[in-house]
Amino acid sequence: MTKSKKNEFRPNDYVVYPAHGVGQIMSIEEQEVAGMTLELFVISFEKDKMTLRVPTHKATEIGMRSLSSPDVVSQAMKTLKGKAKVKRAMWSRRAQEYEQKINSGDLIAIAEVVRDLHRADDQREQSYSERQLYEAALERLTREVAAVSGGDEVAAARQVDEVLGLRAA
């Protein structure tokens, strides 16, 4: 697939923006900035009630991408089934790594965070910061799974839940 900058993303496309997750391109507009005309994607993140304007020529560079393919989604689901990999590093270091994975926009990396921070009901409590990271990763994963499969977040959440429930403790 050639990377023609202009037609890579179109209005109404769902895209993944690394720092914010799934958004929808509302339009492409031109704006005058410092005497230069910039072409911008106007991306709406409905759930966060936020709109972002991203220069079209910078979009790929900053990691904006199309939704994952169904293949990547099933790979993410496989990742969820795996055994949690808990490193023995200090929490602050691990938390940083988890946050980088979440903000990478990489669905598999996000699934790893969900897997590693998921707690079954009978497991030890999570700290507040663990819970925050877990929920952020879970939300990113669920939203993208929903967007890929046609937009039903409740069904996507149920699917992720089921997979997590099947895990070998």
Image (cartoon, helix red, strand yellow):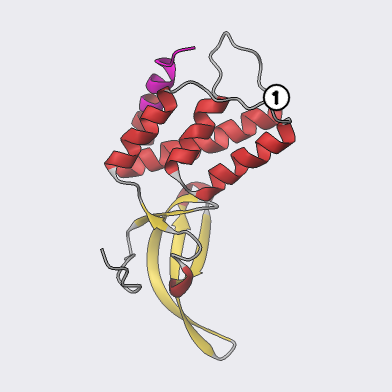
Q: Is residue 154 visible?
A: no
- Depth check: 19 or 169 in front? 169
Asked whether 163 falls inside the magenta stretch, the response is yes
Q: Which residue is mark 1?
A: 127
Instruction: Write the residue at 44% across / 13% down.
Output: 168
Q: Secondary structure at mark 1?
A: loop
Please give left or right for residue 87 compared with residue 12 in the image.
Answer: right
Q: Position of residue 14 (x, y in %)?
A: 36, 54
Please give left or right for residue 137 compared with residue 75 in the image.
Answer: right
- Depth check: 158 or 117 in front? 117
User: What type is the residue that disc 1 sits on?
Assistant: Ser
- Depth check: 120 or 108 in front? 108
Q: Residue furthest top?
A: 122
The span picked out in magenta is 159-169
Image quadrant where residue 152 sits: top left
Q: Position of residue 96 (x, y in %)?
A: 67, 41
Image quadrant where residue 59 sits: bottom left
